[in-house]
Structures are given as structure tokens and as C-alpha cells.
């Protein structure tokens, strides 16, 4: 199952289409390659480092509220979800 997190764009994209987004106070750089019409102030869904879809502010707020009700209460927990699963345990050499 995949999880996309609502975020607000807070910087202009650079020459490689990366922009800074704000997710509950946590700042991350994501690619806007899949949402070329997105601009500062727009809300987007972020998955695996990519803004995959523009969304409106109400949908963003509803989605964040739903995540809070699911148990994600703090921005650092949300950032951990965005950054991906924890590193797998090392497998001993045979």
C-alpha cells in the first residue's frame, strides 16, 4: 500500500524541478516533475519524493486530519513516513 502526504509548496522550483514543501512544519525537497503547473502556495500530494497531484486546501486539511485520527500526531512521525520504511536489518554473512 502506498501513502501520499499533503504538503504546501513554499519555494520556487530550481533548474531540476525540485522545490521545498512544508508538511506540518517539516520542510522537505520534492520533485515537481509530475506537477509542472504547481507553484508556491499550492497544495500537493507527495509520494516517494515526488509531488504526484495538485489538491485544494480543504482536501489537504481533511487528509491531514484523517492521518492524525489514524495515530500520526506529530510532524516527525509524518516525516518518517515520507522518508520511507526503516532500513532493513543487516543479514549476517554466510
Image: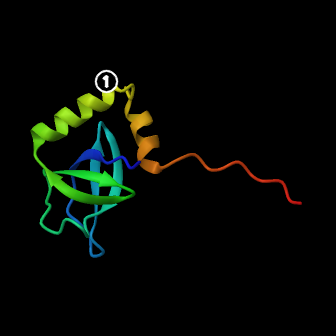
Which residue appears at 31% of the width and 32% of the height?
67
Position of residue 82 in the picture relative to residue 4 (left or right): right
Compare residues 47 and 40 and report the one nearer the observer.
47
Q: Residue at x 62, y 50 (%)?
A: 87
The residue lying furthest to the bottom in this view is 15
For the C terminus, the quadrant is bottom right
Front in this rendered view, residue 78 or 91: 91
Q: Is residue 67 above or below residue 43?
A: above
**x and y, in percent, of residue 89 in the image:** 70, 48
**Where residue 59 sits in the image (x, y, percent)?**
14, 40
Q: Give how far across and how far down residue 77 sits, in percent.
A: 44, 34
| Residue lying furthest front | 1
Residue at the (32%, 27%) spot, across then down: 68
Res 35 → quadrant: bottom left
Q: Is residue 65 left or right of residue 92?
A: left
| Depicted 19 relative to depicted 14: above or below | above
Picture layout, residue 17 above or below residue 77? below
For the image shown, how many numbered marks are present on the structure? 1
The residue tagged 1 is: 69
Q: Position of residue 70 (x, y in %)?
A: 35, 27
Amino acid at each position: 500500500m502506498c501513502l501520499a502526504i499533503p504538503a504546501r509548496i513554499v519555494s520556487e522550483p530550481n533548474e531540476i524541478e525540485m522545490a521545498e514543501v512544508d508538511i506540518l512544519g517539516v520542510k522537505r525537497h520534492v520533485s515537481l516533475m509530475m506537477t509542472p503547473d504547481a507553484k508556491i502556495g499550492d497544495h500537493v500530494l507527495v509520494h516517494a519524493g515526488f509531488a504526484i497531484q495538485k489538491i485544494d486546501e480543504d482536501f489537504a486539511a481533511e487528509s491531514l486530519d484523517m492521518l492524525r485520527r489514524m495515530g500520526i500526531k506529530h510532524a516527525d512521525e509524518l516525516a518518517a513516513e515520507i522518508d520511507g520504511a526503516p532500513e532493513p536489518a543487516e543479514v549476517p554473512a554466510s
